[in-house]
Amino acid sequence: MKHFIYLVVFIVMDKETVAQKSEKYFPEEITREFIKDYKYWNDSSFQLESTNKLSADSIIMKSYRALILKYCRPTKNYQGVAYGSDSNHCPEQEIITEKKVTNDKAIIKTRFKSKTLSYIEDDYEYHFVKVEGKWFLEEVYLVDGDGKYEGL
């Protein structure tokens, strides 16, 4: 339980740092940080849920909100929380495949290839907007042959 509480504190404390960095960091660097933080959040949430079901939901929801606020604008409406034994995003399994950056919009495309389940291969698009000199994550889309699906 202490480990997960530290996750919440880490994400909240580092929130301003990402916004400040976004003035000089490019969207692909922020994408890499998000992937790393998402993986940490997913794994911590899965571990907490499996060991402490009584208070896990509330803590997991609060920490997900903190993760969203770290990368997105405060007005971001996000979907329900989803996590599992294998994270959808992982720095060792997800690579940037394409970058499209204009003055105030960016799309970073990635491909996730599972190291343990070779048949799992997913494409994602990270959509960013630049507001007052800072890059914010607007949405992460899962992309397949049928379309794009919101992931935040």
Image (spheres, rainbow, N blue to C red):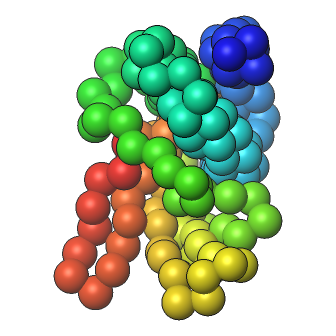
Q: Residue at x 39, y 44 (%)?
A: 82
Looking at the image, residue 104 lies above or below residue 134: below
Residue depicted at 53% across the width and 90% down the height = 119
Relative height, residue 111 to residue 58 (above, below): below
Question: In the image, residue 3 lies at what x, y percent?
Answer: 76, 20
Identify which residue, 32 or 10, lies in the foreground: 10
Count of numbered circles in the view: 0
Determine the image quadrant of residue 38. Answer: top right
Q: Return the x and y of residue 14 as percentages of the image width and height.
A: 74, 17
Instruction: Pick the quarter of the image with the N terminus.
Output: top right
Q: Is 152 placed left or right of 121 in the picture? A: left
The quadrant of the image that shows the C terminus is top left
- Quadrant in the rendering for residue 51: top right
The residue that appears at 75% across and 59% down in the rendered structure is 91
| Position above or below: 134 against 109 | above
Image vertical order of residue 3 relative to residue 94, above or below = above
x and y, in percent, of residue 116 in the image: 68, 78
Between residues 4 and 151, which one lies in front from this camera angle?
A: 4
Q: Is residue 30 left or right of residue 66?
A: right
Confirm whether residue 142 shows in the render: yes
- In this rendering, position of residue 67 left or right of residue 36: left
Whether residue 20 is visible, yes or no, is no
The residue depicted at 43 percent of the width and 52 percent of the height is 140
